[in-house]
Structure formats: structure tokens, C-alpha cells
Image (spheres, rainbow, N blue to C red):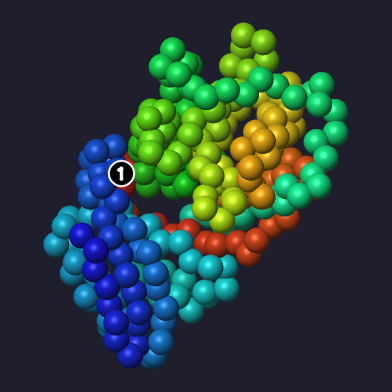
């Protein structure tokens, strides 16, 4: 399903997120674009709500630029709730100096033998993400989503799954994609819970910056929730700059809310 509203008062587009339905147990919709154009925008939302109810969606998500307060207030008037602020760190690789190369860790493409360890990290490492933080949703949905993501990335057409190791010990994984404009986009990354707080963060991130540079990337870019302040500080220490942030909102059908 991909639908839209194009009226004098409201421009809006949305589609189903089929990768989330098997995990959530109900249809999930993503609003992919939204702009309030006139005073009757609230009435125009009825068309979207009818389409949402026609497919019995249990969750609707929407991500807006940080300054779209008119649109955010319209969403809130129709039952959406603010979930998170998302930052977009970016690092130019031209003349980037990694410093102490002895601190770098082993980086390699993942293989089938790595998957049990990587899936366990995916199940346990993500505690700041929106599906886990929304108190209305089953936290198990978040864990399964990330496990599915990691599993699918092993043989993905564009995304690549990397393992970062200290000797024989797997300490982290990254899911990355080299885009046509020279950007190495870090879709997903995590340090194993038993390796957190032991000085691996900076070494892991520097190792993956070097991987991007060696792959011919001109820059690295990613996204991160504002509540993940420890990793935000790491990006700042490594010299990343931050693009304009965005806001995420959820609408959750009452019968699917966590009790």
C-alpha cells in the first residue's frame, strides 16, 4: 500500500512497512512525507485515518524535520506521541587522521559461523531505540526487529555486515552501505553488552572509519537517538559534525498497547 493526500490544506504520503508486520503481529504504516498547507489540514487527516483503519494498522510512525512544529502538533491532535529526537552525525574522510593505528581492531565481513553471536548481540544491545522505549509496545518487538535486520544483512544486495574483533573475541558488528555519492552509511551498529564500558567504543568506531576510507568512501554518516548520550559524546570526540535533527512520532492502536 502506498497512498497520499494532495489537497490545498495538506500534503501527506504513507506506505505499509511489511518488514515490521511479522514481528509486530499487526500491519505497520510509515508516513513518508507530510506538510501542512492550510487551515483545514486536521479535517483532511480523515482520509489517512480511514486508510489506516481499513488495513487495521496497529502502529503508525512518522519522522519529521526538527522544525516542522505545525505538522507535529497536527499529529499530536490525532493521537500521535513524540518518541525521540534523531541526530545525523557525519564525518568527512578527506585528510582524516586515525591517530594510533595500534588501537585499531580486526574488521572483516561476517560469515554464517558468526551469526549466533551477532544475533545475540542484536537481541541484547539495543536499549535506546524507539520500539524499546515506547511504553505502549512489547519490548520483545524491538529485539526481534534487530535480529531480523542483522540476519537479512548477511546476504543483502546493498548492505554489508561487518564483524569487529579483539583477537578471537567478537566485540561489535556494523551494518553499512556504500552509497553512490561516496557516503558510507552506517545503518546499524552495536557493541556486545559484555564488551561495553571496557574501552572498546572508540577503537571500534575508528576501525570502522578506516574500513570506510579503505573502501573509497568520502564521508561516513549515520543516525542516532538523542537519548543515547554516551555514543553521541563518542561521535563528538571523533570529530563528527551533526546535520539538522529530526523528530519521530508513534500512533498506537489502543488494543495493541502494552498492559
On-image quarter of the C terminus: top left
Placement of 111 over or under 185, stated as above or below: above
Q: Is residue 64 left or right of residue 147?
A: right
104 vs 182: above or below: above
Query: Secondary structure beneath disc 1?
Result: loop
Left-right relation of 242 to 127? right
Foreground residue among 179 and 73: 179
* Label 1 Cα neighbours within 10 Å, binned few <14 / some 14-19 / many ≥20: some
Quadrant in which residue 48 is drawn: bottom left
Query: In this rendering, does residue 55 appear at all?
Result: yes
- Residue 16 percent location from the top left of the image: 26, 55
- Residue shown at 35% from the left, 63% from the top: 31
Point out residue 165 in the picture as x, y percentages from the top left corner.
63, 18
Residue drawn at (23%, 50%) of the image: 27
User: In this orientation, which residue lies closer to the viewer: 156 or 37?
Assistant: 156
Please indicate whether residue 209 sits to the left or right of residue 50 in the image: right
The residue furthest front is 216
Relative to residue 81, is residue 256 depicted above or below?
Answer: above
Q: Which residue is mark 1?
A: 20
Amino acid at each position: 500500500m502506498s497512498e497520499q493526500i494532495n489537497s490545498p490544506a495538506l500534503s501527506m504520503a504513507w506506505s505499509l512497512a511489511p518488514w515490521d508486520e511479522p514481528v509486530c503481529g499487526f500491519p505497520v504504516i510509515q508516513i513518508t512525507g507530510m506538510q501542512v498547507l492550510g487551515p483545514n489540514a486536521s479535517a483532511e487527516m480523515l482520509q489517512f485515518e480511514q486508510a489506516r483503519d481499513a488495513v487495521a494498522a496497529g502502529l503508525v510512525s512518522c519522522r519529521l524535520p526538527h522544525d516542522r512544529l505545525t505538522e507535529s502538533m497536527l499529529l499530536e491532535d490525532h493521537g500521535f506521541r513524540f518518541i525521540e529526537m534523531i541526530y545525523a552525525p557525519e564525518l568527512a574522510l578527506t585528510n582524516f587522521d586515525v591517530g594510533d593505528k595500534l588501537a585499531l581492531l580486526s574488521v572483516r565481513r561476517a560469515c554464517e559461523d558468526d551469526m549466533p553471536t551477532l544475533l545475540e548481540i542484536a537481541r541484547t544491545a539495543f536499549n535506546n531505540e524507539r520500539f524499546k522505549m515506547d511504553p505502549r509496545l512489547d519490548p520483545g518487538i524491538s529485539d526481534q526487529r534487530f535480529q531480523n535486520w542483522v540476519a537479512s544483512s548477511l546476504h543483502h544486495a546493498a548492505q554489508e555486515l561487518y564483524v569487529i574483533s579483539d583477537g578471537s573475541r567478537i566485540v561489535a558488528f556494523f551494518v553499512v552501505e556504500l552509497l553512490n555519492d561516496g557516503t558510507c552509511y552506517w545503518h546499524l551498529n552495536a557493541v556486545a553488552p559484555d564488551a561495553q564500558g571496557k574501552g572498546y567504543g572508540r577503537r571500534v568506531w575508528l576501525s570502522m572509519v578506516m574500513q570506510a576510507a579503505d573502501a573509497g568512501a568520502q564521508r561516513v554518516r549515520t543516525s542516532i537517538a538523542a537519548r543515547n548520550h554516551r555514543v553521541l559524546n563518542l561521535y563528538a570526540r571523533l570529530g563528527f559534525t551533526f546535520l539538522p535533527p529530526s523528530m519521530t512520532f508513534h500512533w498506537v492502536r489502543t488494543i495493541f498497547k502494552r498492559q
